[in-house]
Amino acid sequence: MARGRPRRGCAVTDDRRTQLADNLARVEDRISTACAKAGRARDEVTLIVVTKTYPASDVRLLAELGVRQVAENRDQEAAPKAAECADLSLTWHFVGQLQTNKVRSVAGYAGIVQSVDRPRLATALSKEAVRSGRELGCLIQVAFDVESGQSGRIVGDRGGVAPEGVAELAEVIAGSQGLRLDGVMTVAPLAGPYAGRQRAAFERLVEISSDLCTSHPAATMVSAGMSADLEDAVAAGATHVRIGSAVLGVRPRLG
């Protein structure tokens, strides 16, 4: 029987797989080069691919290419995507600002919540972790947009606790059933004393991490750096980088 033309869907999938593979290779080269410049071993830095706005089919292709850590920032997108990819061996990270009314859903699929920034959220996560019989890893999101002495939360949709609030929140998480304190996270600040100084912000985060580890030795994870500034994060000492557009591409604007 003569072979027909390849189905268009198959060709598109192959093209996308090639694109993702090429992008991952470039990101891998950037991380490896940054590690070498910083005198660090490549295995000290873990790549987390942020798949927000991209379909579950991309997550499957990434898994085929060896990606094991993926992140999302909106539960309404993440929950169905995680369900569709439940057969894959992946760790899902939740990296967006999390409202307590979404905690039950997020606790059902996330292995690590990177955006814990207030005791009330930790308490809600603990309740749902216990209810579902799971252990949730937690990172304290540190906000460098806030000035010393301000309230723990910043205004806006990025979230985070002021550096002065990290120790207190760490005690809440560490003492909560079903939660595991894994470390700290930040996003390069857009305002405040560290605006435009992401390397300095990441270095400060590593200092905060070192202080935290004196009381909580297992909380060694430092999540910092994205597509535009991963080199600064690696140089500062980040253990995890969260990369979206450099792997998946820049999503075109609609309209």
Image: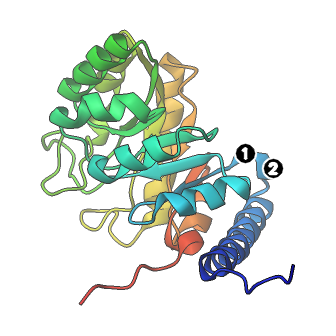
Q: Is residue 203 above or below residue 133?
A: below
Expressed as whole percent of the image width and height from the top left, the position of residue 31 reads 70, 63
- Name the residue located 79 percent from the left edge and 55 percent from the top edge: 39
The one nearer the camera, 86 or 215, is: 86
The one nearer the camera, 218 or 12, is: 12
Expressed as whole percent of the image width and height from the top left, the position of residue 197 reads 42, 68
| Element type at mark 2 | loop
- Name the residue located 50 percent from the left edge and 64 percent from the top edge: 226
Amino acid type shown at disc 2: Ala
Query: Which of the 4 image quadrants contains residue 54?
Result: bottom left
| Element type at mark 1 | helix
Q: Tell me the tag on residue 44.
A: 1
Amino acid type shown at disc 1: Glu
Is residue 196 toward the left or the right of residue 235 in the image? left
Is residue 12 toward the left or the right of residue 113 in the image? right
Check disc 2: other Cα within 10 Å, few if <14, some if 14-19, many if 20+. Answer: few
The one nearer the camera, 91 or 121, is: 91
- Name the residue located 17 percent from the left edge and 50 percent from the top edge: 154
Q: Which of the image's four quarters has the N terminus?
A: bottom right
Q: Tell me the tag on residue 41.
A: 2
Query: Which of the 4 image quadrants contains residue 110?
Result: top left
- Name the residue located 38 percent from the left edge and 85 percent from the top edge: 252
